[in-house]
Protein backbone atom coordinates (compact mmCIF):
# COMPACT_ATOMS: atom_id res chain seq x y z
CA UNK A 1 0.00 0.00 0.00
CA UNK A 2 1.50 3.39 -0.96
CA UNK A 3 2.22 5.90 1.80
CA UNK A 4 0.14 9.01 1.12
CA UNK A 5 0.10 10.83 4.48
CA UNK A 6 2.74 10.88 7.21
CA UNK A 7 2.86 12.18 10.77
CA UNK A 8 6.23 13.81 11.51
CA UNK A 9 6.93 14.33 15.21
CA UNK A 10 9.57 16.92 16.07
CA UNK A 11 10.26 20.41 14.71
CA UNK A 12 14.02 20.79 14.98
CA UNK A 13 16.36 20.66 11.99
CA UNK A 14 15.80 16.91 11.54
CA UNK A 15 12.00 17.05 11.86
CA UNK A 16 11.45 20.08 9.65
CA UNK A 17 13.76 18.83 6.89
CA UNK A 18 12.07 15.40 7.04
CA UNK A 19 8.68 17.05 6.66
CA UNK A 20 9.97 19.09 3.71
CA UNK A 21 11.40 15.98 2.05
CA UNK A 22 7.99 14.35 2.22
CA UNK A 23 6.20 17.45 0.89
CA UNK A 24 8.65 17.82 -1.98
CA UNK A 25 7.81 14.23 -2.94
CA UNK A 26 4.09 15.01 -2.96
CA UNK A 27 3.33 13.25 0.32
CA UNK A 28 0.82 14.86 2.69
CA UNK A 29 2.22 15.79 6.09
CA UNK A 30 0.94 16.30 9.62
CA UNK A 31 3.61 17.97 11.80
CA UNK A 32 3.47 17.88 15.58
CA UNK A 33 5.98 18.90 18.21
CA UNK A 34 6.05 19.68 21.91
CA UNK A 35 7.94 22.92 21.21
CA UNK A 36 8.43 25.17 18.22
CA UNK A 37 11.80 25.26 16.45
CA UNK A 38 12.85 28.54 18.08
CA UNK A 39 12.06 27.43 21.62
CA UNK A 40 15.17 27.74 23.86
CA UNK A 41 15.07 24.00 24.57
CA UNK A 42 15.44 23.11 20.88
CA UNK A 43 19.03 22.01 20.35
CA UNK A 44 18.88 22.91 16.65
CA UNK A 45 18.19 26.55 17.49
CA UNK A 46 21.24 27.08 19.69
CA UNK A 47 23.70 24.95 17.74
CA UNK A 48 26.81 26.38 16.12
CA UNK A 49 25.62 25.34 12.67
CA UNK A 50 29.09 24.52 11.32
CA UNK A 51 29.11 21.70 8.78
CA UNK A 52 31.63 19.23 10.17
CA UNK A 53 31.01 15.69 11.42
CA UNK A 54 31.31 15.97 15.20
CA UNK A 55 30.67 13.51 18.03
CA UNK A 56 28.71 11.01 15.94
CA UNK A 57 30.42 7.70 15.23
CA UNK A 58 27.72 6.13 13.07
CA UNK A 59 29.25 4.72 9.87
CA UNK A 60 26.43 6.31 7.83
CA UNK A 61 27.32 9.85 8.89
CA UNK A 62 29.72 10.56 6.02
CA UNK A 63 27.01 9.64 3.50
CA UNK A 64 24.43 11.87 5.15
CA UNK A 65 26.98 14.66 5.59
CA UNK A 66 27.87 14.58 1.89
CA UNK A 67 24.20 14.91 0.89
CA UNK A 68 23.77 17.77 3.36
CA UNK A 69 26.90 19.52 2.14
CA UNK A 70 25.64 19.37 -1.44
CA UNK A 71 22.45 21.21 -0.51
CA UNK A 72 24.06 23.75 1.82
CA UNK A 73 26.84 24.53 -0.64
CA UNK A 74 24.37 25.36 -3.40
CA UNK A 75 22.17 27.26 -0.96
CA UNK A 76 25.11 29.50 -0.04
CA UNK A 77 26.20 30.06 -3.65
CA UNK A 78 22.82 30.79 -5.22
CA UNK A 79 21.16 33.20 -2.80
CA UNK A 80 22.24 36.69 -1.77
CA UNK A 81 20.27 36.55 1.48
CA UNK A 82 21.00 32.89 2.19
CA UNK A 83 20.90 31.56 5.79
CA UNK A 84 24.05 29.62 4.83
CA UNK A 85 27.51 31.20 4.65
CA UNK A 86 30.73 29.56 3.48
CA UNK A 87 33.18 30.30 6.29
CA UNK A 88 36.92 29.61 6.58
CA UNK A 89 37.59 27.13 9.39
CA UNK A 90 40.76 26.27 11.29
CA UNK A 91 41.11 23.26 13.59
CA UNK A 92 44.18 23.62 15.79
CA UNK A 93 46.39 20.55 16.16
CA UNK A 94 49.36 19.74 18.37
CA UNK A 95 50.71 17.01 16.07
CA UNK A 96 50.96 16.20 12.38
CA UNK A 97 47.90 14.25 11.18
CA UNK A 98 49.46 13.35 7.84
CA UNK A 99 51.32 10.04 7.64
CA UNK A 100 51.94 9.80 3.88
CA UNK A 101 52.35 12.42 1.18
CA UNK A 102 49.12 11.57 -0.60
CA UNK A 103 45.70 12.37 0.88
CA UNK A 104 44.67 8.73 0.55
CA UNK A 105 47.65 7.62 2.67
CA UNK A 106 46.96 9.67 5.78
CA UNK A 107 44.70 9.32 8.81
CA UNK A 108 42.50 12.32 8.04
CA UNK A 109 38.70 11.81 8.12
CA UNK A 110 37.19 10.81 4.79
CA UNK A 111 34.99 13.94 4.68
CA UNK A 112 38.12 16.05 4.20
CA UNK A 113 38.52 14.68 0.63
CA UNK A 114 35.72 16.77 -0.88
CA UNK A 115 37.48 19.24 -3.19
CA UNK A 116 34.89 21.95 -2.49
CA UNK A 117 36.21 22.22 1.07
CA UNK A 118 39.67 23.25 -0.19
CA UNK A 119 40.99 21.21 2.73
CA UNK A 120 44.63 21.63 3.73
CA UNK A 121 46.74 20.18 6.50
CA UNK A 122 49.25 22.91 7.33
CA UNK A 123 52.00 23.86 9.69
CA UNK A 124 51.18 26.99 11.62
CA UNK A 125 53.88 28.83 9.70
CA UNK A 126 52.22 27.88 6.41
CA UNK A 127 48.84 29.07 7.66
CA UNK A 128 50.20 32.47 8.65
CA UNK A 129 52.15 32.81 5.43
CA UNK A 130 48.92 32.17 3.48
CA UNK A 131 47.11 34.61 5.72
CA UNK A 132 48.86 37.55 4.07
CA UNK A 133 46.32 36.83 1.31
CA UNK A 134 43.37 35.29 3.15
CA UNK A 135 43.10 37.89 5.96
CA UNK A 136 41.67 35.38 8.43
CA UNK A 137 40.95 36.66 11.93
CA UNK A 138 43.16 34.21 13.86
CA UNK A 139 45.55 34.40 16.84
CA UNK A 140 49.17 35.28 16.16
CA UNK A 141 51.78 32.67 15.28
CA UNK A 142 53.61 33.38 18.54
CA UNK A 143 50.43 32.90 20.59
CA UNK A 144 49.61 29.60 18.92
CA UNK A 145 53.14 28.25 19.27
CA UNK A 146 53.23 29.21 22.95
CA UNK A 147 49.98 27.27 23.43
CA UNK A 148 51.53 24.22 21.77
CA UNK A 149 49.72 24.29 18.43
CA UNK A 150 52.12 23.63 15.55
CA UNK A 151 49.70 22.29 12.92
CA UNK A 152 46.15 22.84 11.76
CA UNK A 153 43.40 21.81 9.39
CA UNK A 154 42.24 24.64 7.17
CA UNK A 155 39.10 24.37 5.03
CA UNK A 156 35.97 26.24 3.95
CA UNK A 157 32.65 24.89 5.22
CA UNK A 158 29.01 25.98 5.32
CA UNK A 159 27.72 27.55 8.51
CA UNK A 160 23.95 27.59 8.95
CA UNK A 161 22.31 30.58 10.61
CA UNK A 162 20.22 28.14 12.63
CA UNK A 163 17.31 30.34 13.82
CA UNK A 164 16.90 31.82 10.34
CA UNK A 165 17.02 28.43 8.60
CA UNK A 166 14.54 26.91 11.06
CA UNK A 167 12.14 29.78 10.42
CA UNK A 168 12.46 29.38 6.64
CA UNK A 169 11.85 25.64 6.80
CA UNK A 170 8.83 26.08 9.07
CA UNK A 171 7.40 28.73 6.73
CA UNK A 172 7.74 26.35 3.79
CA UNK A 173 6.05 23.54 5.68
CA UNK A 174 3.18 25.71 6.86
CA UNK A 175 2.55 27.23 3.43
CA UNK A 176 2.77 24.01 1.41
CA UNK A 177 -0.47 22.82 -0.16
CA UNK A 178 0.18 19.22 0.94
CA UNK A 179 0.52 20.16 4.62
CA UNK A 180 -2.57 18.90 6.42
CA UNK A 181 -2.03 20.12 9.98
CA UNK A 182 0.72 21.79 12.03
CA UNK A 183 0.84 21.88 15.83
CA UNK A 184 4.26 22.85 17.15
CA UNK A 185 3.18 24.03 20.58
CA UNK A 186 1.67 20.86 21.98
CA UNK A 187 3.04 21.62 25.45
CA UNK A 188 0.66 24.58 25.69
CA UNK A 189 -2.37 22.51 24.65
CA UNK A 190 -2.39 18.75 24.99
CA UNK A 191 0.99 18.58 26.71
CA UNK A 192 2.55 16.56 23.92
CA UNK A 193 2.99 12.85 23.41
CA UNK A 194 4.04 10.67 26.33
CA UNK A 195 4.89 7.51 24.41
CA UNK A 196 5.40 5.99 20.99
CA UNK A 197 1.92 4.54 21.39
CA UNK A 198 0.51 8.07 21.58
CA UNK A 199 2.19 8.88 18.26
CA UNK A 200 0.63 5.82 16.64
CA UNK A 201 -2.82 6.77 17.96
CA UNK A 202 -2.38 10.31 16.58
CA UNK A 203 -1.35 8.89 13.22
CA UNK A 204 -4.57 6.88 13.10
CA UNK A 205 -6.60 9.92 14.13
CA UNK A 206 -5.16 11.94 11.22
CA UNK A 207 -5.45 8.96 8.85
CA UNK A 208 -1.69 8.79 8.38
CA UNK A 209 -0.03 5.72 6.90
CA UNK A 210 3.25 6.25 8.76
CA UNK A 211 5.02 8.08 11.59
CA UNK A 212 8.56 9.47 11.42
CA UNK A 213 9.88 10.10 14.91
CA UNK A 214 12.30 13.07 14.93
CA UNK A 215 12.03 13.93 18.62
CA UNK A 216 15.74 14.10 19.36
CA UNK A 217 16.51 13.80 23.06
CA UNK A 218 12.77 13.52 23.75
CA UNK A 219 12.92 9.98 22.38
CA UNK A 220 14.65 8.90 25.57
CA UNK A 221 11.31 8.98 27.40
CA UNK A 222 8.95 8.58 24.45
CA UNK A 223 10.64 5.37 23.29
CA UNK A 224 12.26 4.28 26.56
CA UNK A 225 15.63 4.55 24.83
CA UNK A 226 18.18 4.28 27.62
CA UNK A 227 21.05 4.45 25.11
CA UNK A 228 20.17 8.06 24.32
CA UNK A 229 22.02 10.58 26.50
CA UNK A 230 21.94 14.35 26.60
CA UNK A 231 25.38 15.85 25.94
CA UNK A 232 25.32 19.31 27.49
CA UNK A 233 26.64 22.25 25.51
CA UNK A 234 27.22 25.85 26.63
CA UNK A 235 27.71 29.04 24.64
CA UNK A 236 28.30 32.73 24.97
CA UNK A 237 26.88 34.67 22.02
CA UNK A 238 28.23 38.09 21.00
CA UNK A 239 27.21 40.65 18.40
CA UNK A 240 29.22 39.93 15.26
CA UNK A 241 29.10 43.27 13.48
CA UNK A 242 28.81 46.11 15.98
CA UNK A 243 31.84 45.67 18.20
CA UNK A 244 35.58 46.27 17.76
CA UNK A 245 37.75 43.18 18.15
CA UNK A 246 41.40 42.79 19.03
CA UNK A 247 42.57 40.32 16.37
CA UNK A 248 43.84 41.83 13.14
CA UNK A 249 42.44 41.16 9.66
CA UNK A 250 38.86 41.26 8.57
CA UNK A 251 37.62 37.79 7.69
CA UNK A 252 35.72 36.01 10.45
CA UNK A 253 36.95 32.46 10.91
CA UNK A 254 35.63 29.42 12.74
CA UNK A 255 38.38 28.17 15.06
CA UNK A 256 38.00 24.85 16.87
CA UNK A 257 40.20 23.16 19.47
CA UNK A 258 39.59 19.87 21.31
CA UNK A 259 43.14 18.98 22.32
CA UNK A 260 46.19 20.53 23.94
CA UNK A 261 46.19 23.41 26.41
CA UNK A 262 43.14 25.24 25.07
CA UNK A 263 40.57 22.46 24.73
CA UNK A 264 39.60 18.83 25.28
CA UNK A 265 36.96 16.39 24.05
CA UNK A 266 34.63 17.30 26.92
CA UNK A 267 35.55 20.99 27.05
CA UNK A 268 36.26 22.12 23.47
CA UNK A 269 37.29 25.71 22.81
CA UNK A 270 35.83 27.33 19.72
CA UNK A 271 34.48 30.38 17.97
CA UNK A 272 31.93 30.12 15.15
CA UNK A 273 30.62 33.14 13.19
CA UNK A 274 26.94 32.35 12.65
CA UNK A 275 24.62 34.90 11.11
CA UNK A 276 24.87 38.10 13.15
CA UNK A 277 26.38 36.32 16.16
CA UNK A 278 29.77 35.08 17.29
CA UNK A 279 29.41 31.85 19.24
CA UNK A 280 31.99 30.99 21.89
CA UNK A 281 32.01 27.48 23.32
CA UNK A 282 31.87 25.07 24.72
CA UNK A 283 31.28 21.70 26.34
CA UNK A 284 30.26 18.15 25.50
CA UNK A 285 29.27 16.67 28.86
CA UNK A 286 27.20 13.50 28.62
CA UNK A 287 24.60 13.14 31.35
CA UNK A 288 25.14 16.63 32.79
CA UNK A 289 21.68 18.12 33.44
CA UNK A 290 22.75 21.47 34.91
CA UNK A 291 20.31 24.01 33.42
CA UNK A 292 22.47 27.09 34.01
CA UNK A 293 26.11 27.89 33.32
CA UNK A 294 28.35 27.34 36.32
CA UNK A 295 30.66 30.12 37.46
CA UNK A 296 33.82 28.25 36.41
CA UNK A 297 32.26 27.49 33.01
CA UNK A 298 31.41 31.14 32.43
CA UNK A 299 34.97 32.10 33.35
CA UNK A 300 36.32 29.52 30.92
CA UNK A 301 34.13 30.87 28.11
CA UNK A 302 35.37 34.38 28.90
CA UNK A 303 38.95 33.15 28.58
CA UNK A 304 38.05 31.51 25.27
CA UNK A 305 36.54 34.81 24.12
CA UNK A 306 39.77 36.60 24.97
CA UNK A 307 41.82 34.05 22.99
CA UNK A 308 39.77 34.93 19.92
CA UNK A 309 40.01 38.70 20.35
CA UNK A 310 36.69 39.45 22.05
CA UNK A 311 36.62 41.91 24.94
CA UNK A 312 34.09 40.04 27.09
CA UNK A 313 33.93 42.90 29.60
CA UNK A 314 32.53 45.51 27.22
CA UNK A 315 30.66 43.20 24.84
CA UNK A 316 26.98 42.56 25.42
CA UNK A 317 26.42 38.82 25.37
CA UNK A 318 23.74 36.16 25.59
CA UNK A 319 24.01 32.69 27.06
CA UNK A 320 22.70 29.38 25.76
CA UNK A 321 22.61 25.89 27.30
CA UNK A 322 21.39 22.86 25.37
CA UNK A 323 21.65 19.10 25.13
CA UNK A 324 22.75 17.21 22.04
CA UNK A 325 20.98 13.85 21.52
CA UNK A 326 24.01 11.56 21.86
CA UNK A 327 23.83 7.89 20.94
CA UNK A 328 26.40 5.28 19.89
CA UNK A 329 24.53 4.95 16.58
CA UNK A 330 21.83 7.18 15.13
CA UNK A 331 18.45 5.49 15.40
CA UNK A 332 17.42 5.78 11.76
CA UNK A 333 15.48 2.64 10.93
CA UNK A 334 12.04 1.07 10.65
CA UNK A 335 10.55 0.04 14.00
CA UNK A 336 9.44 -3.55 13.43
CA UNK A 337 7.76 -3.75 16.84
CA UNK A 338 4.81 -1.62 15.63
CA UNK A 339 2.26 -3.20 13.29
CA UNK A 340 -0.62 -0.71 13.14
CA UNK A 341 1.20 1.94 11.11
CA UNK A 342 4.71 2.16 9.69
CA UNK A 343 7.09 3.78 12.18
CA UNK A 344 10.52 5.16 11.25
CA UNK A 345 12.89 6.62 13.82
CA UNK A 346 15.25 9.46 12.93
CA UNK A 347 17.00 10.71 16.07
CA UNK A 348 20.27 10.58 18.00
CA UNK A 349 22.56 12.58 15.68
CA UNK A 350 24.80 13.83 18.51
CA UNK A 351 26.77 16.94 17.59
CA UNK A 352 26.16 16.43 13.86
CA UNK A 353 22.52 17.42 13.49
CA UNK A 354 23.09 20.32 11.08
CA UNK A 355 25.83 18.32 9.34
CA UNK A 356 23.52 15.41 8.54
CA UNK A 357 19.97 16.81 8.55
CA UNK A 358 19.38 16.67 4.79
CA UNK A 359 20.92 13.25 4.24
CA UNK A 360 19.22 11.77 7.28
CA UNK A 361 15.85 13.20 6.22
CA UNK A 362 16.17 11.69 2.75
CA UNK A 363 17.09 8.29 4.11
CA UNK A 364 14.20 8.34 6.58
CA UNK A 365 11.76 9.25 3.80
CA UNK A 366 13.20 6.55 1.54
CA UNK A 367 12.52 4.01 4.30
CA UNK A 368 9.05 5.42 4.77
CA UNK A 369 8.06 5.30 1.11
CA UNK A 370 9.98 2.15 0.17
Image (cartoon, helix red, strand yellow):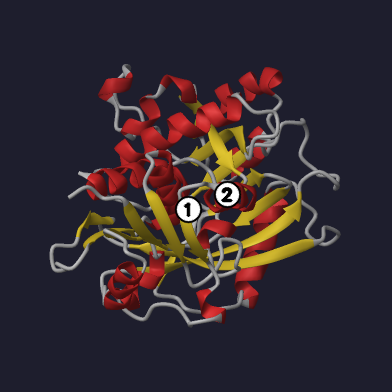
Please name whichever residue, 218 or 56, is drawn nearer the observer in this view of the structure: 218
Residues at badges 1 and 2 in contact (C-beta under 8 Å)? Answer: yes
Rendered residue at 36%/25% (across/down): 113
Which element type, helix, strand or loop, lies under badge 1?
strand
Q: Quadrant of the C terminus?
A: top left
Please name whichever residue, 144 or 66, is drawn nearer the observer in this view of the structure: 66
Residue 102 in percent (x, y) is at 31, 17
Callout 1 crowding tier (Cα within 10 Å): few <14, some 14–19, many ≥20: many
* 301 to 101, vertically: above or below: below
Please name whichever residue, 48 or 178, is drawn nearer the observer in this view of the structure: 178
Residue 227 in percent (x, y) is at 26, 70
Left or right, residue 17 beside residue 169: left
Rendered residue at 47%/53% (across/down): 179
Q: CA distance from mark 1 to mark 2?
A: 7 Å
Is residue 317 shown to the viewer in this render?
Answer: yes
Rendered residue at 36%/61% (across/down): 7
Q: Which residue is the site of mark 2?
A: 175
Left or right, residue 148 beside residue 197: right
* 28 to 139, vertically: above or below: below
Left or right, residue 10 beside residue 134: left
Rendered residue at 40%/68% (across/down): 217
Checking the image for residue 179, the label placed there is 1
Residue 17 in percent (x, y) is at 45, 48
Which element type, helix, strand or loop, lies under badge 2?
helix
Residue 16 in percent (x, y) is at 47, 53
Quadrant in which residue 98 is drawn: top left
Amino acid sequence: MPVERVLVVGAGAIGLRTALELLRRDVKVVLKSRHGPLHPSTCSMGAGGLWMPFRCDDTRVNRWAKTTFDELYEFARNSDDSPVEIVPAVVLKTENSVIGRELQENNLPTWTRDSRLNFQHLTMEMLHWQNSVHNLRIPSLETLHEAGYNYCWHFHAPVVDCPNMLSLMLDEVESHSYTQHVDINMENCSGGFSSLGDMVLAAKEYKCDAVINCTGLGAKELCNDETLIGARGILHLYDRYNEVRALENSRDTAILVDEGTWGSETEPCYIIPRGDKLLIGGSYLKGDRKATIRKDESERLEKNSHKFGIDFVSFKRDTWIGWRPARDEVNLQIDTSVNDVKVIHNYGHGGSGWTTFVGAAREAVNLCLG
